[in-house]
Amino acid sequence: MARVLIVFATTEGHTRRVAEAVAREVIKKGNQAEVIELSLHSGPADVEAYDAVIIAASVHAGKHQRAARGFVLSHRDFLKTRITAFLSVSLFAASTDPAGLDTAEAQAQSFLRETGWRPDYVETVPGAFRYSGFSRPWQWVIKTSERLFKKELQKQGWPRLTEDQEFTRWEAVRGFVDRLCAQIESSGAESCGVTDPRR
């Protein structure tokens, strides 16, 4: 049984749902999982107690949360010794347009360059759009944008902007956990702490 740490940073709450879904799947595979929100905690007291680490963060204004960057920078040397994954949650990852998907990947890679981290898995996860959470002035702006850019929005896979929408492909999230847990199992919990000389 491996111990998996899942830390996340969220702005509107959807990345919490992603992190908790990952934890449930990890536990279904017979492992232990601990979920920690980085805006509330800096991380566990003993990170070395874990065999694998998953970091999830969402994109806002083109950047991931500062708390996620801080965690990676603080534990970068430790992360080199474990199986690790980065989940970048964004709306661009929900696009049906290749250019949008390229942007989602570029945002994830920008985070990795800034932190100097090289995880074993990098996943771009479609997020959620909460129209009801915007103020009335912003809702008016969104309605106007929907009318003005209707064709372009449809091309990018956005049928409506004036409704709450969830784009996360939960089946893909489960597939990611399957791959991660298979690697943990093949490595063995005791060997997870061996530094990979290629990093």
Image (tube, grey):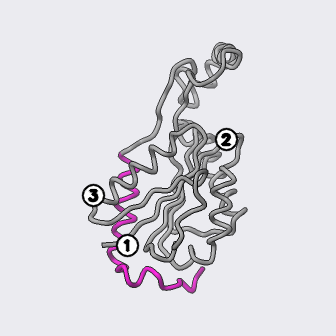
Q: Nearer the viewer, mark 3 or mark 1?
A: 3
Label 2: few (<14), some (14–19) or many (≥20) C-alpha neighbours in 10 Å: some
**163 above or below 66?**
above
Residue 46, label in figure: none
Instruction: Reply yes or no: does residue 180 show up in magenta.
Output: yes
Left/right placement of residue 193 relative to residue 188 reads right
**74 above or below 88?**
below
Asked which secondary structure carries label 2, the reply is strand
Label 3: few (<14), some (14–19) or many (≥20) C-alpha neighbours in 10 Å: few
Residue 28, label in figure: 3
The stretch in magenta equals 171-199
Asked which secondary structure carries label 3, the reply is helix
Asked which secondary structure carries label 1, the reply is helix
Cα distance in 3D space between marks 2 and 1:
31 Å
Q: Earlier in the sequence, mark 3 or mark 1?
A: 3
Query: How far across and how far down the image is residue 124, in percent?
Result: 53, 50
Residue 60, label in figure: 2
> Mark 1 = which residue?
184
Q: Amino acid at mark 1?
A: Ile
Q: Earlier in the sequence, mark 3 or mark 2?
A: 3
Label 1: few (<14), some (14–19) or many (≥20) C-alpha neighbours in 10 Å: many
Instruction: Reply yes or no: does residue 193 show up in magenta.
Output: yes
**In percent of the image, x 61 and y 47: which residue is there?**
104
**In percent of the image, x 57 and y 77: which residue is there?**
78
**In percent of the image, x 58 and y 50: which residue is there?**
9
Cα distance in 3D space between marks 3 and 2:
31 Å
Q: Amino acid at mark 2?
A: His
Left/right placement of residue 137 relative to residue 167 reads right
